Amino acid sequence: MSLPGMWEFPGGKIEPDESPEQALIRELEEELLCSAEIGEHVQTTEHEYDFGIVILTTYYCSLTGAEPRLTEHSEIRWVEAAELDQLDWAPADIPAVERVMKDFRV
């Protein structure tokens, strides 16, 4: 999914016979050339856009290798939990943003 000018968490489509966690590991490797350990499930959200329905499953992750590098996107940014609400998030990502801020008591 690409919504120009809006922020999204890393990830992508789940391939057949792939779990959400496996898809996230693959997408991080493909899109950001990094590896991560998948942690606790944060949120699963279903959002209807004009181009279709998106089901977004979000996890906490820990990098296990090199820092992410852009291959497909125009910008990447590390932000504190308290700064998350300062970004213009894609609508499907907003419930996960709110949950992360709640988890970190922001």
Image (cartoon, rainbow, N blue to C red):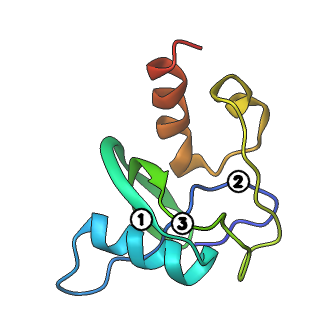
For the residues marked 1 and 3, what is the alpha-carbon distance in whole angstroms?
33 Å
Q: Secondary structure at mark 2?
A: loop
> What residue appears at the point 57 percent right and 66 percent down from the top-left corner?
50
> Quarter holding the N terminus?
bottom right
From this view, report whether residue 39 is shown above or below residue 17. Answer: above
On the image, the x and y values in percent for residue 31 come to 60, 79
Between residue 77 and residue 11, name the one nearer to us: 77
Relative side of 99 to 74, left or right: left
Observer-side mark, 2 or 1, equals: 2
Asked whether the residues under the numbered discs 1 and 3 touch, taking CB atoms below 8 Å apart as contact, a structural biologist would say no
> What residue appears at the point 44 percent right and 50 percent down from the top-left corner?
61
Q: How many marks?
A: 3
> What residue appears at the point 56 percent right and 72 percent down from the top-left corner?
34
The residue most toward the top is: 105
On the image, the x and y values in percent for residue 57 come to 36, 54
Mark 2 highlights which residue? Answer: 7
Mark 3 highlights which residue? Answer: 65
For the residues marked 2 and 1, what is the alpha-carbon distance in whole angstroms?
18 Å
